[in-house]
């Protein structure tokens, strides 16, 4: 299967969860972590897109352009992205975003209203942006309509078109059908953005990848309005398990999620679950009874407990083989 | 697709999350709710099965038989089940479980060790139990081996055989392959039990159903060790959306989860997320901006907010049509 590119939207879609109140220092911390993890694209800004900070959508703590400048100041590897909803953000805002160091702009419309993206996509292309067309509420139109609207965005010059499951309402078959059709009928790469309302953020992302999508969205720990998005670290784990080529370092996405994001959102009263331990078990296929012993041995030998779990998985450990743990920790220490 | 039967394991697999410390009153409350929701099978007992309450596996607050009697005393529609791991539980324990009103016994072994279930399955059948063979850690064997072991359980007299993803390690293709093969090669129905370590509890359950599985497990709110199980209420929602025949009332599973289980586990320090709101949005395909208004209107007209959301979904509401909400609430009130 072709290479997949990961966009992290913790600091845009995820900002709904903290009332768009991320501090500039929070933004820098998270961007630095995502950048070190080699996430391809990092989306930053108000949850409802450029200049969404209004009475209608809720005020963000900082101006979008301040947030984008903060992000840009620490990003070395990734591309900085922002979202724009025609009707809220303007072409003027795009120019200002460009000056802040934004390289990717995602232009979002309701799935039946691609027409209103023409001017913004055309102008964004002229300004040298990498332009992503974002068809929201993709469950609300049948496959023919989704195709028709996606083709419009392609004709305006979009570099990628996404089917966006804004309400977390799609089932895997619907995803396969729509993404598969777009992949077949369009010349540009196709993306998928998921929400977890029916517990299908990851399941649908896999369905999209199997149908040929090559741009996938996530947010750290799944941070996002309501049920949240696809957890970025889990998406990367699944890409690894599917042996699909990508650029992202799984352990580093876990680190920025558990060590940076979780303490940050706690300040805003959000208790984000730490997915790391249970993910490591599922990723390695190791039963949970090994976890506590692996962590103890890791502390004793000053190694990463995750490397112990990975090795237990490689050895196909089953219950009763906990004595392997110290042996593995010792070997890792002497490496 | 054929009818699906739902087993809820909140009070068995979920009991890992509360250190096997459910009170008898808790058990009665949950069983009553699940029974009213017409869940087919309710599994109760120590997380590691009959007489698992030991120094090795952690002591439960009550004896399995006390728990089973408490459950049995309130169940009217559902079948009461318990788990037995050969080597822990004995044939004597099965007799005692029978006297407590247990109708279904699930005999669990590691995926490569079905041999050790022969005596227990044979004896359980003689006692008149409905017997489920449970092949744990099904990711650890290839499809031929899983088939060989499942056939053993079938030959011993099992009424159903499950592939059990104990570590939440399986990907949808693996599920499709293994479940599809068992469905094709065995005469008895095939079941699937999921864990959410890689965010695939629901995605894999759908893959299993599409491959022909007709017995599916869940636990309320996904309560379970580590990443937990498939949330029962979400499984039912997905069955509805897939238009698959089943016996369970979705709203009632939500009620027992949010109104009974969440307060109960809070006593044990477990903060279980309430999935209801975000599930309702995904289920109906309605954007989250409608939720607050729907709840306000529901309170004003004394109707169930979920019925408002369902009707908004039927009308294919998109942002900007919030004025429909009061109209719908009024109509529901006058019904």
Image (spheres, coloured by chain):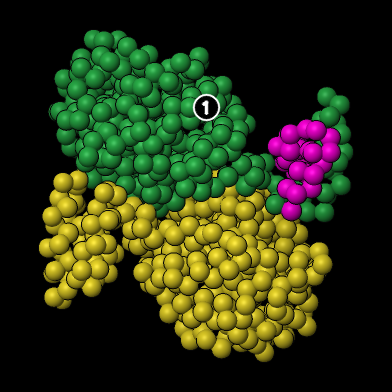
Chain colours: A green, B yellow
- Answer above or below: position of A254 versus A129: below
Instruction: Give the image location of residue A265, x and y in percent.
Output: 49, 41
- Answer above or below: position of B113 versus A229: below
Q: Main secondary structure of the magenta part?
A: helix
**Residue A298 is inside the magenta segment:** yes
**Along the horizontal axis of the image, is A23 left or right of B43?**
left
Residue shown at 68%/65% (left/top)? B19
Between A243 and B310, the one nearer to me in the picture: B310
Residue shown at 47%/22% (left/top)? A40
| Secondary structure category for the residue under label 1 | helix
Instruction: Give the image location of residue B284, x and y in percent.
Output: 28, 56
Instruction: Report if residue B59 is visible in the image.
Output: yes
Instruction: Give the image location of residue B174, x and y in percent.
Output: 57, 46
Residue segment shown in magenta: A289-316
- The image quadrant that residue A279 belongs to is top right
Residue shown at 53%/23% (left/top)? A32
Q: Which residue is mark 1?
A: A29
């Amino acid at each position: 299967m072709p290479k997949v590119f990961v966009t992290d939207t913790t600091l845009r879609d995820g900002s709904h969860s903290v009332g768009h109140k991320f501090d500039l220092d929070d933004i820098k911390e998270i961007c630095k972590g995502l950048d070190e993890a080699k996430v391809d694209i990092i989306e930053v800004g108000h949850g409802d897109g450029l200049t969404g900070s209004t009475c209608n959508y809720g005020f963000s703590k900082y101006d979008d352009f301040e947030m984008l400048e903060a992000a840009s100041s620490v990003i070395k590897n990734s591309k900085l992205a922002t979202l724009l909803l025609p009707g809220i953000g303007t072409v003027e805002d795009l120019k200002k975003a460009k000056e802040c160091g934004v390289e990717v702009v995602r232009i979002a419309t309701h799935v039946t209203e691609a027409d209103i993206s023409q001017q913004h996509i055309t102008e964004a292309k002229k300004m040298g942006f990498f332009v992503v067309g974002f068809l929201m509420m993709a469950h609300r139109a049948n496959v023919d309509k989704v195709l028709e609207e996606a083709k419009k965005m392609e004709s305006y010059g979009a570099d990628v078109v996404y089917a966006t499951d804004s309400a977390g309402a799609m089932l895997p078959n619907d995803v396969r059908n729509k993404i598969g059709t777009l992949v077949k009928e369009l010349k540009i790469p196709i993306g998928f953005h998921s929400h977890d309302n029916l517990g299908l953020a990851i399941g649908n992302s896999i369905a999209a990848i199997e149908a040929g999508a090559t741009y996938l969205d996530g947010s750290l720990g799944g941070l996002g309005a309501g049920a949240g998005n696809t957890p970025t670290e889990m998406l990367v784990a699944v890409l690894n398990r599917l042996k699909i080529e990508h650029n992202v370092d799984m352990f580093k996405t876990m680190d920025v999620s558990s060590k940076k994001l979780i303490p940050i959102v706690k300040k805003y009263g959000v208790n984000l679950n730490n997915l790391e331990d249970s993910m490591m078990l599922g990723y390695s296929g190791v039963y949970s009874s090994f976890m506590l012993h692996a962590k103890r041995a890791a502390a004793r030998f000053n190694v990463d407990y995750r490397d112990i779990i990975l090795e237990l998985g490689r050895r196909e450990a089953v219950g009763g083989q906990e004595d392997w743990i110290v042996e593995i920790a010792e070997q890792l220490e002497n490496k």
